[in-house]
Image (cartoon, grey):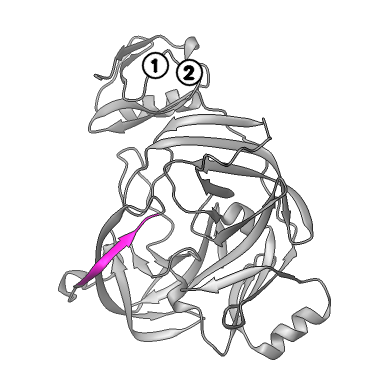
Amino acid sequence: MQLEGKNALLDVEIDHVNTKFLLDTGAGLSVLIDSTIVLDFNNKKFGSLGSAKGADRKKIKNRFFTVELNTDLFKSESKVLSFVNLPKSKCIKTKKEYTGILGMDVFFNEDFVMQLDFTGSKVCNITSPQLQQYLTDGQYQLLKSKCKSNQIFVYLNIEGKEYPFKLDTGYTGNIIMPYDAELNFKNDKKLELEGSLFQTISSHTSGSETLYEKMPITFGTYNLEAKLNVSTSIKAQNIGIDFIKAFDWLIDYNNNKVYIKRNQNPIESILNRKISYYVKVNQEKLQIVIKEKSQTQYQLGDQIISVDGQKVTAENQCELQDLLNKTYDWNSLQLEVIPVQK
């Protein structure tokens, strides 16, 4: 396993072509997102069965086909994959570091225990005797957990109350919870945003996000501080790779037992980037897609047509998008704006 930025990547061979897939413990199924890696993709026979849902619970049609798929963990001559065209943004020119997603459908074998070792950067299956060897040194601790339907849930205590969270290495953030009127956290270190903050497998989200920093968390016997997002757009309650990578994991799925030990990876607890407004090129228009809730000068959907006297064109809109998104105080800029029509 390689940790590329906030992505846990695994080497795979798909129809005899070497590539990388994202390890996603939050996904029940494995998915191809780049058809160019499969040489005879257009000649594959596709089926359709039901739908797939993103973290926002929006559905997309589930198209599936078979490939030969090999990794160090398993080999399959006819592995079923779903194919999904992820939403694309015009100004993102670089390709993703991975061409597919390995979900939990490939991991759980009744004879093995899954090891997520972020200290040694490896994912592997171990036997029950090997598990016992790891447990004898006393460094790993047993968590309260629930394993079902190819999903792993662990429990975090936040401000004195216990909540279940799905283990989701495909989520690049820290901790996320869906909005609930009863979630009245006392922590006043927060940033409130409105707009389109996330991209899921099905769409770009739209809603309100409350980002907490230095949130006190108890996880097993560990007392920690972490970032936490309460979201109206994301309906999943998950811990992401920013939190997961700070521990090494032993997952005995079939016996519903999860063990962890703290490693040297830090847990991010500070909101490193403050946001007033955030823009994105949408249908050839440079529009505001995120804003801090307290900001009133501009509104979501407003179109920026000029920055410091420079007209926004198809040639420079990505450059100006980058400039605006790196500038916290837009009062330092001269902007010409077409207000969104209500």
Residue 332 placed where, x, y %?
A: 49, 11
Q: Which residue is mark 1?
A: 298
Asked if residue 245 shows in the view, the reply is no
Q: Residue furthest right?
A: 137
Q: Position of 75 compared to 341: left or right?
A: right
Magenta span of residues: 48-54
Q: Residues within 10 Å of mark 2 (few under 14, many from 20)?
A: few
Name the residue type under label 2.
Answer: Gln
Q: Residues within 10 Å of mark 1 (few under 14, many from 20)?
A: some
Residue 92 placed where, x, y %?
A: 36, 42
Image mark for residue 295: 2
* Secondary element type, mark 1: loop
Is 214 magenta? The answer is no
Name the quadrant of the C terminus.
top left
Residue 117 placed where, x, y %?
A: 65, 69
Asked if residue 279 shows in the view, the reply is yes
Seen from the viewer's position, the closer of residues 78 and 168 is 168
Q: Are marks 1 and 2 in contact (CB under 8 Å)?
A: yes
Q: Position of 30 compared to 112: left or right?
A: left
Residue 16 placed where, x, y %?
A: 34, 79
Image mark for residue 252: none
Question: Is 313 drawn above or below residue 209 in the view shown?
Answer: above
Location of residue 122 by image quarter: bottom right
Question: Is 258 drawn above or below residue 225 in the view shown?
Answer: below
Q: Mainly helix, strand or loop, the magenta region?
A: strand
* Secondary element type, mark 2: loop
Residue at 32 percent across and 41 percent down: it is 89
Distance from Cα at disc 1 to Cα at disc 2: 7 Å
Name the quadrant of the N terminus.
bottom right
